[in-house]
């Protein structure tokens, strides 16, 4: 047996401790995954023009950061071209991060008028969840009698400009108080994926629970795209959601104790403390549905590592068109209700940016032949010193509406009564009418108020040198200003895949999807489940509410007898193949498409072209082909048993087909191209067809119905009018004859 002196043992233990501490950071570093994020200029700045001038000399770049990531390094890669007339020693670009000066970028005299590149480090200690990088241009073309509005004062920022951020994962506590973080982080500017894990092929009840949870994440994501990879049994990398019941769990939860009720828990993966797992557990499928409903509707009550949901009761049913993301159409809406961030209704500067408000409307709002949308606008502004060309310009969806002078008087009450017509009014209409083509009114609209001030800084006179300090002009809209969409009916021509792609209609008519039925294949593959989850997340993003009342079945016979709007995944049943509106069928490698005449020209001025550009007549050709390349489709048609109900099918066969379909639904540009009754998705993009019979959903007054449906048939309308006049004249003549005979009989 060997022995050591006590002093030597102490020294040896101290050496071991030092070695352990030296290697501890290395082991921790292995458990802390890092990643790099590159944000290009179009994602950082609003608008399409990235130029700085002597008067408008400031550009703001905005970005957000995840809460579970620590920034270790951030660099601004500036690419710009300065005016060749700039004085290099006096001209430069100041860079601020959250109002803290990060550095000054000089104008290189050797590269005047040519593109320059500079990399500037952004101090991570000044970064927060929301960040602003301000670029301030200081330009000079002469050292005396300088005019800030001179045309030689400019600096062009290239789209190659970007910000590169290196991040390190932070250790997170298993606390549901931060939910939906880290599974979904609204501040993450990168595309987000959230895997769903099942023990095996999910039952309809478990699939419904997963769909509700996916739609909840979609309601939080809004415009951000979400992907939901699905796996059976295997645990993927990254944060994940596991849905399971006692006795049927994936391998990673084999040793996890059984639960005695609806349970939601947040744990760390065994081999990676930075990977978080959201466990949605129950004794049976009913418990699982209760747990998901509690998570989707009662998230603010959750805290701690584990929560048991006791009950979820509906106190009052939701009403049609009451989606949180849609503005109310049954009452006037204040501008303060449309505000998305603090200070949105205020601007400042010599050339202030426009005040922009988003108006999300139901796609079936019937505003045809209306005399205008009432809007009461109150605003305040710094008055110009003299009567000049300063004015407020109003535009809708980028289309000019009208402009109003900014008077120097102190009484600036604004536009007390303005109407936004949605159709061309008669030439003799009041001058207060604002003519906006109806095709510019859609589901998602932007109204802009642009305060433009006239400047005398550019009016220098020869021989006169004055120093003029620009006034810090300000303008603001009053939050009590209102816009009123109440009183309009709901009526829309279908099939209308544009309404589905942009607003999730007709399923989004009820925010909780209580009138929606989803039909899926009996043996679901993981990619089919992903397609379903992402489709419902897209609808949740449009309405801003989880689809906790959606119904899912795998039996077409059961679905046919239910009064609901129907969404199906996969191929169409055999019973559909003989329908006159089965305009596209996918059968493995075989594809059949029915085509119609070309739609009417976009410039057609028929009143009904506002709501329809469908061709008149039936299909004229039918084409069938075979090919091995991927293809998918979206089709719309009317329910056979319920005329006011619609059906939308997401058609695909192979996993590659479903990948195409998922990519198309996640791409805003491709969604904008979807319309008509058939959308074909290929590697090259999407193509839309308007073919087959049409139908209408919604209700109109009888006189509106007659006028609308005859508005594009002037000859028939004229004949009906002549017949009506003749009928009234005949009845009046008969009445007068009867009165005359009665009077003559009395006189006799």
Image (cartoon, helix red, strand yellow):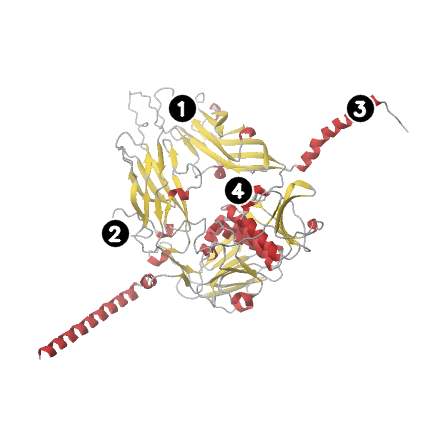
Residue 522 visible in the current orientation: yes
Residue in the foreground of this view, choosing between 388 and 48: 388
Image marks 4 and 2: residues in contact by CB distance under 8 Å: no
Decide: is 221 above or below 742: above
Q: Quadrant of the C terminus?
A: bottom left
Query: What residue is disc 3 on?
Result: 10
Closer to the chain start, of discs 2 and 3, is: 3
For disc 1, the neighbor class at 10 Å (few under 14, some 14 to 19, many from 20) is many
Query: Is residue 602 shown above or below 80?
Result: below
Instruction: Compare marks 3 and 4 and give the one earlier in the sequence.
Output: 3
Q: Secondary structure at mark 4?
A: loop
User: In the displayed structure, would residue 26 be above or below residue 502?
Assistant: above
**Mark 3 or mark 4, which is nearer to you?**
3
Q: Distance of mark 3 from mark 4, alpha carbons? A: 53 Å
Contact between marks 3 and 4 (CB within 8 A): the answer is: no
From the viewer's side, name the closer residue of 118 and 647: 647
Residue ID for mark 4? 186
Name the spot of residue 702 as percent of width and height, x first: 33, 64
């Amino acid at each position: 047996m060997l022995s050591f002196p006590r002093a030597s043992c102490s020294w040896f233990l101290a050496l071991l401790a030092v070695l352990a501490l030296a290697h501890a950071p290395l082991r921790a570093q292995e458990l802390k995954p890092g990643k790099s994020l590159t944000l290009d200029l179009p994602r950082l700045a609003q608008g399409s023009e990235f130029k700085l001038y002597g008067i408008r000399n400031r550009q703001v770049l905005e970005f957000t950061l995840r809460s579970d990531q620590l920034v270790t390094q951030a660099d601004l890669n500036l690419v710009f071209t300065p005016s060749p007339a700039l004085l290099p020693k006096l001209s430069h670009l100041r860079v601020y991060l959250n109002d803290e000066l990060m550095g000054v970028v000089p104008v290189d005299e050797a590269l005047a008028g040519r593109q320059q590149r500079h990399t500037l480090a952004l101090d991570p200690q000044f970064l927060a969840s929301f960040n602003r990088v301000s670029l301030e241009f200081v330009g000079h073309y002469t050292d005396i009698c300088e005019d800030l509005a001179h045309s030689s004062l400019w600096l062009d920022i290239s789209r190659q400009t970007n910000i590169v951020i290196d991040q390190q994962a932070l250790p997170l506590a298993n606390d549901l108080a931060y939910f939906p973080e880290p599974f979904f982080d609204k501040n993450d500017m990168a595309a987000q994926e959230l895997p769903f894990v099942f023990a095996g092929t999910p039952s309809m009840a478990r699939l419904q629970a997963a769909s509700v949870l996916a739609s909840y994440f979609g309601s939080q994501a809004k415009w951000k795209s979400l992907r939901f990879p699905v796996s059976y049994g295997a645990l993927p990398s990254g944060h994940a959601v596991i849905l399971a019941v006692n006795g049927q769990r994936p391998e990673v939860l084999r040793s996890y104790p059984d639960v005695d009720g609806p349970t939601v828990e947040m744990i760390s993966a065994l081999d990676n403390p930075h990977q978080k797992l959201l466990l949605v557990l129950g004794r049976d499928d009913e418990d699982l549905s209760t747990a998901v409903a509690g998570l989707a509707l009662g998230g603010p009550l959750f805290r701690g590592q584990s929560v048991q949901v006791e009950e979820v009761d509906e106190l009052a049913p939701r009403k049609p068109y009451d989606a949180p993301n849609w503005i109310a159409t049954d009452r006037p809406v204040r501008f303060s209700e449309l505000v998305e961030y603090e200070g949105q209704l205020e601007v400042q500067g010599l050339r202030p940016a426009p005040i922009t408000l988003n108006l999300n409307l139901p796609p079936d709002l019937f505003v045809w032949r209306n005399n205008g949308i009432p809007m009461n606008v109150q605003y305040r502004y710094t008055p110009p010193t003299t009567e000049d060309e300063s004015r407020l310009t109003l535009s809708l969806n980028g289309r000019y509406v009208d402009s109003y002078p900014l008077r120097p008087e102190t009484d600036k009450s604004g536009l007390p009564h303005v109407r936004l017509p949605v159709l061309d009014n008669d030439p003799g209409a009041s001058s207060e009418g604002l003519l906006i083509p109806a095709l510019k009114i859609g589901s998602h609209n932007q109204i802009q108020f642009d305060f433009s001030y006239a400047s005398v800084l550019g009016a220098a006179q020869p021989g006169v040198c004055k120093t003029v300090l620009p006034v810090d002009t300000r303008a603001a809209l009053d939050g009590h200003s209102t816009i009123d969409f109440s009183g309009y009916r709901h009526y829309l021509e279908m099939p209308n895949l544009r309404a589905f792609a942009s607003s999730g209609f007709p399923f989004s008519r009820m925010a909780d999807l209580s009138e929606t039925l989803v039909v899926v294949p009996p043996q679901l593959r993981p990619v089919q489940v992903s397609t379903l989850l992402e489709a419902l997340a897209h609808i949740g993003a449009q309405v801003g509410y989880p689809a906790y009342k959606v119904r899912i079945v795998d039996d077409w016979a059961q679905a046919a007898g239910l009064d609901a709007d129907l969404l199906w995944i996969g191929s169409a049943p055999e019973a559909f193949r003989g329908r006159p509106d089965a305009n596209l069928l996918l059968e493995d490698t075989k594809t059949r498409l029915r085509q119609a005449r070309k739609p009417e020209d976009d410039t057609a001025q028929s009143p009904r072209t506002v709501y329809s550009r469908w061709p008149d007549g039936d299909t004229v050709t039918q084409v069938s082909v075979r090919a091995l390349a991927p293809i998918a489709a979206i089709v719309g048609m009317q329910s056979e048993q319920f005329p006011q109900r619609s059906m939308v099918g997401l058609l695909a066969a192979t996993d590659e087909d479903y990948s195409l379909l998922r990519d198309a639904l996640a791409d805003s540009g491709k969604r904008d191209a979807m319309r008509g009754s058939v959308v074909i998705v290929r590697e090259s993009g999407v193509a839309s067809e308007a073919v087959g019979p049409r139908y209408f959903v919604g209700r109109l007054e009888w006189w509106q119905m007659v006028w609308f449906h005859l508005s594009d048939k002037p000859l028939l309308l004229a004949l009906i009018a002549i017949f009506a006049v003749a009928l009234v004249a005949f009845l009046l003549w008969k009445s007068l004859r009867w009165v005359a005979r009665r009077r003559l009989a009395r006189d006799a």
